[in-house]
Image (cartoon, helix red, strand yellow):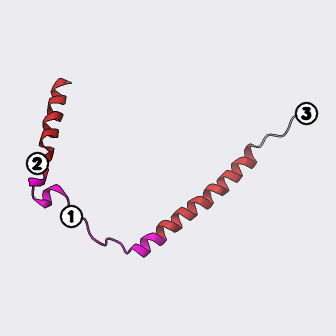
């Protein structure tokens, strides 16, 4: 384990030198507008709403199915 700690310590010491690397090496290029934000927002909202409704329905069905009658 001491060898692994030595490697980690060496990497941490080199971390301040990261700014010397070319920009393309340090940070990969990300597309600016992969999907239109309005479309993405609507799709994610619809998926979340659908999952919420499905969760409510499944919850009600499970409550009714596993409800035990009151014993005297």
Q: Quadrant of the C terminus?
A: top right
What is the spatial separation of the Cα atoms under label 2 and label 3, in whole angstroms?
A: 76 Å
Q: Residue at x 85, y 38 (%)?
A: 70
60 relative to 55 in the view: left or right: right
The residue under label 2 is 17
What is the spatial separation of the Cα atoms under label 1 and label 3, in whole angstroms?
A: 69 Å
The residue under label 1 is 29
Is residue 10 located in the magenta-colored stretch of the structure?
A: no
Residue 34 in the image: x percent, y percent? 32, 71
Dot 2 lies on which element? Answer: helix
Residue 48 is marked as: none
Dividing the picture into quarters, in which one does residue 49 lie? bottom right
- Image depth: mark 2 or mark 3 in front: 2
Q: Is residue 7 above or below residue 2?
A: below
* View extreme (front): residue: 16
Residue stretch in magenta: 19-42
Q: Nearer the viewer, residue 5 or 39?
A: 5
Q: Residue at x 79, y 40 (%)?
A: 68
Crowd class of label 2 (few under 14; some 14 to 19; many from 20; radius 10 Å): few
The residue under label 3 is 72
Dot 1 lies on which element? Answer: loop
């Amino acid at each position: 384990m001491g060898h692994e700690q030595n490697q980690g310590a060496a990497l941490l010491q080199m971390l301040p030198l990261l700014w010397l690397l070319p920009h393309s090496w340090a940070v990969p290029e990300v597309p600016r507008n992969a999907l239109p934000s309005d479309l993405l927002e609507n799709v994610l909202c619809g998926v979340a709403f659908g999952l919420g409704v499905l969760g409510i329905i499944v919850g009600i069905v499970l409550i009714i199915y596993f409800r035990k009658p009151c014993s005297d």
